[in-house]
Image (cartoon, rainbow, N blue to C red):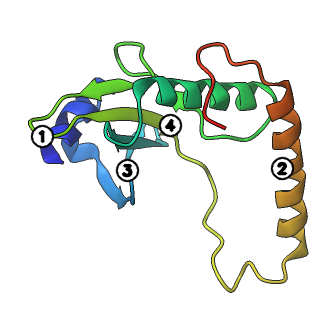
Amino acid sequence: MDEHAAEGAARYGVSQEELTYIGGFQNFIYSYSRDELKYILRFTPSTLRTSEGLVAEIDWIHYLSESGIAVSEPISSINGEYCELIQGNKINFYVTSFKHAPGRKIGYPECLGNSIHYEECGRITGRLHELAKLYNPTIVKRHT
């Protein structure tokens, strides 16, 4: 992954040394900072997603942001792209970057019995369903 991380970071004006590996399951996730703000750099294997699917995802996130939903907004590369292809010897990766979401993860058992969190989750989920019905993709339609 190191060769991909170096090239992917460079596409966003970041050096590999500035990256902190966070983890991942299907993607490789790193964080980096710029001007006292924190960002995410995500590497997605081309065997799992297509560039069209990732561009559609970014279009959806932009739509949600414009509709007032708090999302981790996509960041364009130094080339002005939201999705960059990094070619490797054995596997290719798509790299995307997003603003880091503020706050902290609420884990178990802290999440149990917290009616405020349940109500907020329900409210946001309802709003997402409402917006999904009104959404008119500008690029390509995402999978169902």
At mark 4, the secondary structure is strand
Q: CA distance from mark 4 to mark 2?
A: 20 Å
Picture quarter with the C terminus: top right
Q: CA distance from mark 1 to mark 3?
A: 16 Å
Which residue has dot 4 on it?
98
Quarter of the view holding residue 97: top left
Q: Tell me which amino acid carries mark 1.
A: Lys
Query: How far from the left and from the top, in percent, is residue 68?
Result: 81, 33
Which residue has dot 1 on it?
90
Residue in the image at 59% along x and 14% along y: 139
At mark 2, the secondary structure is helix
Q: Residue 99 got which mark?
A: none
Residue in the image at 77% along x and 38% along y: 69
Which residue has dot 3 on it?
27
Q: Tell me which amino acid carries mark 4.
A: Phe
At mark 1, the secondary structure is loop
Residue in the image at 50% along x and 37% along y: 98
Q: Residues within 10 Å of mark 3 (few under 14, many from 20)?
A: some
Tell me, yes or no, whether the two marked residues, 4 and 2, touch with CB atoms within 8 Å: no
Indicate which disc, 3 or 2, sits on the residue closer to the N terminus: 3
Q: Is residue 46 left or right of residue 137?
A: left
Q: Tell me which amino acid carries mark 2.
A: Ile
Q: Residue furthest front?
A: 144
Q: Nearer the viewer, mark 3 or mark 2?
A: 3
Indicate which disc, 1 or 2, sits on the residue closer to the N terminus: 1
Q: Nearer the viewer, mark 4 or mark 2?
A: 2
Q: Nearer the viewer, residue 96 or 51?
A: 51
